[in-house]
Amino acid sequence: MVDITSSSLFQSNISTILHWPLARKIELLSSFSQCSASLCLCAGWIKPNEVPIHDITTNDDTTVIRKPLLCCSCQHPFDLHYNEKTKAKYWSSESTIEQVDSALQTLLDADLLIRFATSPSLSDQHDLSTNRTLLFIAQTLQSTITTMAIHSSRRDLINTNMSNLLGVCPFEQPCIRDAVINCVCSTTPTAASTATNDNQQLHVIFEAGKQFLNLLNTWKMPSNVAHLLWLEEQPAASVENMRKVNNYELWYARWVGYCIVPQLCPKSLTKYEPTTIFGYEYLSLIFDHFKSDMLTTRTLSPSLIRFFDTFQQTLTESDSACWSSSYERPVIPMLEANIESLLAGDQVNAPANSTNEQTEKKITRRVSKALTNKKQLKRLEPSRMITSTSSSSSPLSPSASPSPSQAQQQNASPLPGSEFINRVWSCVCERHEQRLRAEIEKTLFKANPKRDEVARLAEQRGFAEFHLIKHDLNKHGATETDLMYKRLLQLINVFSRALPKMPQNYIARTVLDPRHQSLIIVFASKVIGGICFRMFPHRNFSEIVFCAVSEYQQVRGYGTHLMNHLKDYHIRLNITNLLTYADGFAVGYFKKQGFSSTITLNEQAYTGYIKDYDGATLMQCSLYTQVTYTRLTETLSLIKESINVIRTHRFNQIKQAHPDAKFLANDIQTVDLSSYDSLLNLDHNETNSSDETVDINLLYITLKSVYQEIRSHPFASHVQKKSIFQDYLSTPPLFPIDLDTIQDRLKAKYYHNAYTFTADVSRLLDTAGRAYANQKKDISNEIRSYDTFVRRKMNEFGLEMGHAPQTYE
Ligand code: COA
């Protein structure tokens, strides 16, 4: 069930780290401490790679001067990262081992939660509310590191931060446990019963109440999406119920944060039982769902079922004494001991020091089970799943860009005679979206994802957000301004770590320059990468100044997806060139992003506008305005699938009609066509398709006229016979064509639709273009003008051919 990326590896890391020398541990923690030098923005110590000369011995051999280690990022000494301003208590050399270990534990717990949130077992359920809560708690833990020393204990600080995040615990008074005890005590046995019966009956009710509490404590609270689905399925789903759901996500986050996650990080977080921290509001919200789960999955005793009903009534009565904080429960001597033991069982967990690997695995499995909603979500209709998960709105999120099918509807004008192709394309897109919704494709963790696939899916699933920011001096509102500065500083930090040779103040000056903008990736509320660029719209280019992704997140496709977002953004603004000075290390990355050191932009356009760096290579990327780069790999794989479907379909048709037909090498990748229902339906209609209803005589009048035109051109002789030009080709064409062949085909009434004719002409021009490309200049010029002429003529006759390619290989 659980696969927290190699949990055991993680455990071994903990034990290794805890055995490090104190100085090394402090160094690790210092990477989370801000530098205290005035005006320094460095957010954490980075150890220099080169070992400096530590000791200089003076002439008298007694005085030793230590050359301080300088931070790679800000060039300030290590001391400035752990002096009194950065809370000396934890980072100074006087810190006790326990204090430092305790802080390290917090860091490791945060790391564990992030791994948990991004583990396949959770992300597969598309349960964003769970993941979001886990990531928020992880961030809360991390944020305690630098402020820890001002609090008397780490747990206090974490508790305060958790309360800021989720509210103060216990959330309601009286709690469910107290209300159950009140309910038991206020239930008077029937008048007809004898005294012995009274006692027995009271015990039965008490036991039923206890069981009720146990069931509620171990019940797996469904996520928001699963709960909504359940509600909709209820015949009596009232408007009132649906309205209450608004609050559900907060209660769910509280349940995750206080009752479930602490089992994973017992050393940092305190675990509570739901019945001791939640009360009336929580129970009213979940009671129906809880009861129905219990009735369908467990065999409940009649007394327990009766208790469910009785207790449910207390929720509906407006003045139920059980839920009143001023209620004084009657003292029932025979129950007092039992009630005392129930009250004493407050489940505040003690730090678990002695948990072995086996127990940890069990806990991890239990937590994972509690947080996944596989069963419930299975029933979820795909369309609803998308709506419920697309809540994370980043300005550059894919919701802003059209889906492949939408894009296709918007952009592609149908090819002549290509109704079948269009049908296949929409079928393939539809299946692709179904697959994505149904989560059959676990691409986030598959073995060989496409270059940007992991990052793209991380964005779609809400783990990562892409934002455009700049130092905007006119920002209104304290929260907005705070967030802007926080992100800009985090970005500066990412750049300074990734580009240690760049002076930090230069990076800060550039990123904070209002003329520069930055596209950033935010993961778990932290900036993990970005591109800082400056636009020159009137010169039709932008300069990429810095580009980096945090060390731990590299080679996961974030760099590619970030660049794709940048390209799409520029296309939207009609800027079609990106320029950058790439140093030796970065050239490889930029080449993979479509940059080249061949600069086609006019030198005057950029000289004096972009910064020149010694030893760096100027690279350019020209953008294709018809392409949506963030969807490019996805669209290409859809096109590939469509081609395979068409080929399989045609192959089957030909095989049926001509069982003895021989095919070229085994390059037909067969596809299971049974899943393309609408495509198969097309088979029956295909004979009636518009292509077939074309008046063949009328078609031939057009084709012959256009053929006469393109043949009468003086340069047509270059392509009259294949022997004239096809010898120039390094690889012979698979389907050779020339004007004579086209003429023969016209005579034989080979063309049943205009599209086949257009395809032949198109292939002819393409082959000729490649054949003459490296021949004498005048011939290649002639073939170019012939190409233009033919395309114009074809268009005049209504046979759409598109523009000529700019260069032939
Ligand atoms: N040289 C050659 N190839 C590189 C590379 C480099 N320095 N950095 C990344 N790549 C390759 C990756 O291996 C990957 O190729 P693949 O898909 O064929 O395996 C491809 O580029 C894209 O990788 P991706 O995962 O999308 O990029 P990333 O998230 O690792 O980010 C950088 C790439 C360059 C931003 C990141 O490595 C980084 O921050 N480097 C340090 C800073 C830097 O050099 N910035 C560039 C100049 S400002």
Image: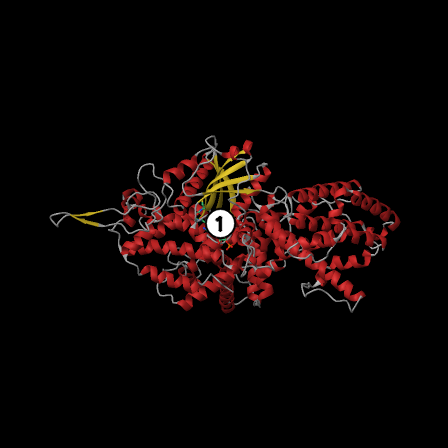
**In the image, residue 332 lies at what x, y percent?**
44, 61
The residue beneath circle 1 is: 589
**In the image, residue 113 lies at what x, y percent?**
44, 56
- Please tell me how many numbered marks the rendered image carries: 1
- What residue is drawn where x is 75% and y is 57%? 678
**10 Å neighbourhood of mark 1: few (<14), some, or many (≥20)?**
few
Of residue 318 and residue 542, the one placed in the foreground of this image is 542
Of residue 652 and residue 365, the one placed in the foreground of this image is 652
Residue 606 vertical position relative to residue 269 in the rendered view, above or below: above
Mark 1 element type: helix
**In the image, residue 38 lies at what x, y percent?**
31, 37
Which amino acid type corresponds to the residue marked 1 in the rendered image?
Answer: Tyr
Say whether mark 1 is within 8 Å of ligand 1: yes
**In the image, residue 56 lies at what x, y percent?**
19, 48
Q: For this view, does 793 lie left or right of residue 498?
A: right
In the rendered image, which quarter is residue 625 located in?
top right
Residue 488 visible (yes or no): yes
Q: For this view, does 577 lie left or right of residue 703?
A: left
